[in-house]
Image (cartoon, helix red, strand yellow):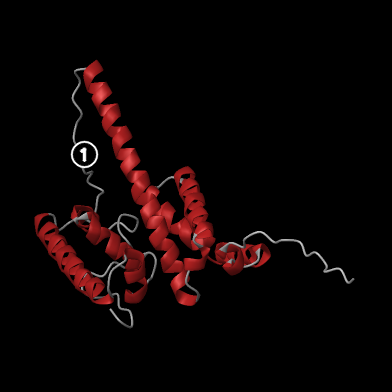
Amino acid sequence: MTETPIRPRLGPVSEDAVHDPPLDDRRQRFEEVFGTHREAVLGYLLRRTGSSHDAADLLSDTFVIAWRRLEEVPAGDQTRPWLFGVARRVLANHRRGEVRRTALTYKLRDELTDTSVPGPEFSDADSTMARAFRALPEPDRELLTLVAWEDLSTAQIATVLGCSRNAVRIRLFRARRRFTELVADRSNAAPSNAVSSNAVPSNTAVNGEISHEDV
């Protein structure tokens, strides 16, 4: 009598096990993304935090998210703006935490002392363009710095902000117009002020000086 060989019973195979790429391939892809875009993302964060320690922490958080969502990271020219979009959200969370901590600090200080806090003052060295730039709404400043500091195209900015190209074009047009008006107002009020090279993005589009292929 021929015995039927007993085959070992295999446990259920998860869908993730079927579709996930090998760990070595995944690690290699991540290392390529990290090595190629680390400096750009770090620069993006440094320009918006002013603190190398905060920027390093936020860089780490950004690439932790990139590792977890590696399958969603686009290839080619869209990788960098996708990472900027992640860094932007990480930075927003960080700023909300800073606002809460600052509010608590002021609250405690006011409870312990009766001293008043003077408002911000501009020195004579502040330039007309610097004051105008700081007077812009935060969304306008963010948009102009993505063009001037990061040198992104309309399509790439749309990826960072999570909106359409047409929306970017409209917002950029309005931001430039508001900036031009603010510069003109402050120039008329204080025509002798000099332009500071470090106060605003060096090539912020005042009269459409910045142009991309699709802006």
**160 w.r.t. 47: above or below:** below
- Residue at point 80% right, 64% down? 6
Image quarter where the C terminus lies is: bottom left
Q: Is residue 202 visible?
A: no
**211 w.r.t. 138: above or below:** below
Total numbered labels:
1
| The quadrant where residue 202 appears | bottom left
- Residue 14: percent from left, percent from top: 58, 62
Three-letter code for the amino acid on which mark 1 is drawn: Pro
- Residue 47: percent from left, percent from top: 39, 54
SS for dot 1: loop
Say which residue label 1 marks.
Answer: 120
- Residue at point 65% right, 66% down? 22
- The answer to which of 66 and 47 lies nearer the viewer is 66
For the residue carrying disc 1, how many other residues have a C-alpha within 10 Å: few (<14), some (14-19), or many (20+)? few
- Residue at point 23% right, 53% down? 134
Residue at the limit of the structure toward the bottom, as seen here = 213
Name the side, left or right, on which 174 lies relative to 55: left
Q: Is residue 178 visible?
A: yes
Image quarter where the N terminus lies is: bottom right
- Residue 96: percent from left, percent from top: 31, 43
- Residue 161: percent from left, percent from top: 31, 64
Name the side, left or right, on which 108 lies relative to 4: left
